[in-house]
Image (tube, rainbow, N blue to C red):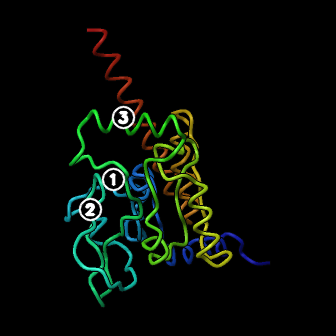
Amino acid sequence: MPDLTNTTMTANATRAATLRIASLLPSTTDICISLRLEHNIVGITHECDFPPSHPLYLSAAPLLADTGTGDEHHGGGRISNVSSGKPNTKPRALTVSQIDIHQQSQAEIDAAVKSSVFNGISLYNLNHSALTDSQPTLILTQSLCDVCAVSKSDVDQEVACNFRPGQCKVLSLEPESLEEVVETFVTVAEACGVKERGVELKAKFWEGGQQILEAASLSRSK
């Protein structure tokens, strides 16, 4: 009789080894890093503004060669582009903001956000060529709000048009409570073949939360 446990572990290990993650939310980028999957991340948002010394840049998955040079600067983040003719080890910026926080005033930004909410149009767009070139096997996104992040319909359309069937999975997260947010740790980890890391991170989060509650309780009792 086959050992199903070993078969499952082997399948998960293979999935993790070939995993290429495109994170379209800063929160899912942080989750992946917390799950020790930074070496599998090939694309992040323009808002994921990490310093060059961050492990995300030092151990990220290699990307395809590109003809671009220099830096891509979209709104809130600066992500180095792929040098011509050479593989890159830095995740690409996969989103573009219609707001430039470095150039627009607070009043202009406020007006743009209100207009987007009123018209139901997202403030963020996909960098289609960057997403396709990164060749992700897993895209992390959300469908709770089409204004505050790239819309899931845009992501689904991009995958349908530019990826082979089964080449890339889209995982949409829609937590509406703290408990559901924490549960996404396990959801993402399981999709990446490392469910045990998600369970571990979930337990660590609640342990930290309990410590905060106990400290707060002691402070009130003094």
Q: Amino acid at mark 2?
A: His
Left or right? Give the position of 10 relative to 89: right
Residue shown at 56%/74% (left/top)?
15
Q: Nearer the viewer, residue 53 or 167?
A: 167
Which mark sits nearer the N-terminus, 1 or 2?
1
Left or right? Give the position of 65 relative to 9: left
Q: Amino acid at mark 3?
A: Ala
| The label number, if any, that marks residue 47 in the structure image | 1
Q: On screen, 56 above or below 13?
A: above
Question: In the displayed image of the protein, which residue is found farthest to the right?
Answer: 1
Viewer-side label of 2, 3:
3
Q: Nearer the viewer, residue 118 or 15?
A: 118
Residue shown at 42%/37% (left/top)?
207
Rounded to the nearest angstrom, the CA distance separating label 2 from label 3 is 22 Å
Left or right? Give the position of 138 relative to 207: right
Residue shown at 46%/61% (left/top)?
126
Looking at the rendered structure, the secondary structure element under dot 2 is strand
Instruction: Name the residue that disc number 3 marks.
Output: 111
Viewer-side label of 3, 1:
3
| The label number, if any, that marks residue 188 in the structure image | none
Which mark sits nearer the N-terminus, 3 or 1?
1
Q: On screen, 206 above or below 59?
A: above
Q: Amino acid at mark 1?
A: Glu
Point out the image quarter for the N terminus. bottom right
Looking at the rendered structure, the secondary structure element under dot 3 is helix
Instruction: Name the residue that disc number 2 marks.
Output: 73
Counting from the top left corner in percent of width and height, residue 102 is at 21, 48
